Image (cartoon, rainbow, N blue to C red):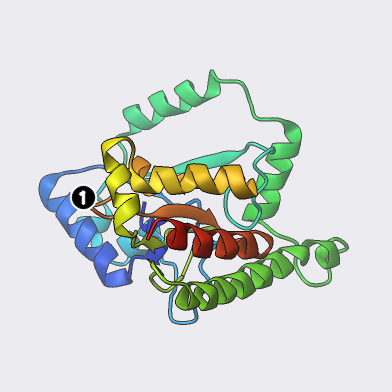
C-alpha cells in the first residue's frame, strides 16, 4: 500500500517512481492498495496513483510493468463498511491471464445492488447542478470533521506525557508511540506493555483500541492504533494521565 496507513504517510511521486523502476528491473508485479486515496488531508501532501505515474514514465516501462490497482467503497470518506463493493484495475497483464482473472471474478456472487450504487457514486460523484449534489456534499463535511479532529488530536498528544506522534497527513487512524514508565515495562514478562494499556483502557473507559504489538512494530517500541474521533479523545486523555501516574 503506498498510502502507508501505519504511519499515516503518503508516498511522494519520486518514491513511487523508484518502486516502479525496481519492479521493472526485478520483473515484479505491483499490487497497489489505493483504497484510502480520498483520505489525504494535509496541505503539503498529494495522492498520486500508481497507474498515472506509470503511464508517464516512458513507453519502455509504462508498457511492461504489471500493475493491479485496488479501490473500495468500504474505505475512504465514503466509509460504507456495510455496503460492500470495490474494483481492481489490471494493467499490462498478459491477455490470457487477464481473461482468467475475469472468469474467476465472474464466478463469485455479485455484491449487493446498494453496494454497487455506492461504488458508482464514489467513482462518478454528483456534480454541481445535479439534483443529488447538495446531499452528496455531506462527504465534504465528513472530510472537514476529520481534518479538525486530527488537529485536535495532535494538540492533545503534545500536552500529554509519555506519548508522541508524527504529523497526521492521511488515513482514519493514528498510531501514537507510547513511552511507558518502568513499572509498566516490567509487565513485559506477562504481556506486552501496549496490550496492558489497551486492556486497562477498555475496562476503564469502554474504548477499544489495538496494541502496536499486533502490527509488527520495532523491538522495544510501543504503540496503539486509535481512531480519529473527537468524542473518544477526552476519555483517552483522562485515562492516559491516570495510567502513567499509576505505573510510574
Q: Along the line of sight, which residue is nearer the eye, 246 or 167?
A: 246
State the residue at coordinates (24%, 60%).
59
Q: How many numbered callouts?
A: 1
Q: Is residue 19 visible?
A: yes
Horizontally, is 39 left or right of 54 in the view? right
Direction bottom: furthest residue: 44
Q: Along the line of sight, which residue is nearer the eye, 95 or 130?
A: 130
Direction top: furthest residue: 107
On screen, 215 above or below 240?
above
Could you say which quadrant of the image residue 106 lies in? top right
Q: Quick one: SS at disc 1?
A: loop
Q: Is residue 69 visible?
A: no
Q: Along the line of sight, which residue is nearer the eye, 81 or 13?
A: 81
> Residue 236's spot in the image, x, y percent?
57, 60
> Residue 89's spot in the image, x, y percent?
45, 44
For disc 1, the neighbor class at 10 Å (few under 14, some 14 to 19, many from 20) is few
On screen, 150 above or below 173?
below
Horizontally, is 94 left or right of 104 in the view? left
On screen, 219 above or below 127?
above
State the residue at coordinates (23%, 52%).
218
| Residue placed under numbered mark 1 in the picture | 219
On screen, 41 above or below 60?
below
Q: State the quadrant of the C terminus.
A: bottom left
Could you say which quadrant of the image residue 72 lies in? top right
Could you say which quadrant of the image residue 246 lies in? bottom left
> Residue 152's spot in the image, x, y percent?
59, 75
> Residue 155's spot in the image, x, y percent?
53, 78
Amino acid at each position: 500500500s503506498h498510502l502507508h496507513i501505519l504511519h499515516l504517510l503518503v508516498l511522494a511521486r519520486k518514491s513511487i517512481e523508484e518502486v516502479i523502476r525496481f519492479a521493472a528491473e526485478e520483473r515484479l508485479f505491483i499490487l497497489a492498495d489505493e483504497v484510502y486515496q480520498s483520505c489525504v488531508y494535509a496541505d503539503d501532501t498529494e495522492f498520486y496513483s500508481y497507474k498515472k505515474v506509470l503511464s508517464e514514465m516512458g513507453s519502455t516501462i509504462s508498457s511492461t510493468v504489471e500493475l493491479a490497482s485496488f479501490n473500495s467503497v468500504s474505505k475512504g470518506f465514503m466509509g460504507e463498511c456495510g455496503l460492500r463493493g470495490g474494483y481492481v484495475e489490471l494493467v499490462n497483464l498478459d491477455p490470457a491471464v487477464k481473461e482468467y482473472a475475469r472468469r474467476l471474478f465472474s464466478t463469485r456472487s455479485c455484491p449487493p445492488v446498494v453496494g454497487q450504487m455506492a461504488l458508482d457514486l464514489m467513482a462518478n460523484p454528483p456534480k454541481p447542478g445535479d439534483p443529488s449534489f447538495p446531499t452528496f456534499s455531506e462527504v465534504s463535511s465528513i472530510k472537514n470533521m476529520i481534518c479538525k479532529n486530527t488537529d485536535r488530536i495532535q494538540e492533545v498528544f503534545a500536552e500529554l506525557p509519555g506519548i508522541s506522534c508524527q504529523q497526521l497527513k492521511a488515513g482514519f487512524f493514528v498510531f501514537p508511540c507510547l513511552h511507558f514508565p518502568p513499572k509498566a515495562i516490567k509487565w513485559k514478562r506477562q504481556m506486552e506493555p501496549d496490550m496492558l494499556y489497551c486492556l486497562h483502557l477498555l475496562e476503564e473507559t469502554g474504548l477499544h483500541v489495538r496494541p502496536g504489538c499486533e502490527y509488527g512494530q520495532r523491538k522495544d517500541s510501543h504503540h496503539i492504533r486509535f481512531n480519529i474521533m473527537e468524542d473518544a479523545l477526552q476519555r483517552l486523555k483522562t485515562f492516559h494521565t491516570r495510567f502513567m501516574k499509576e505505573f510510574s
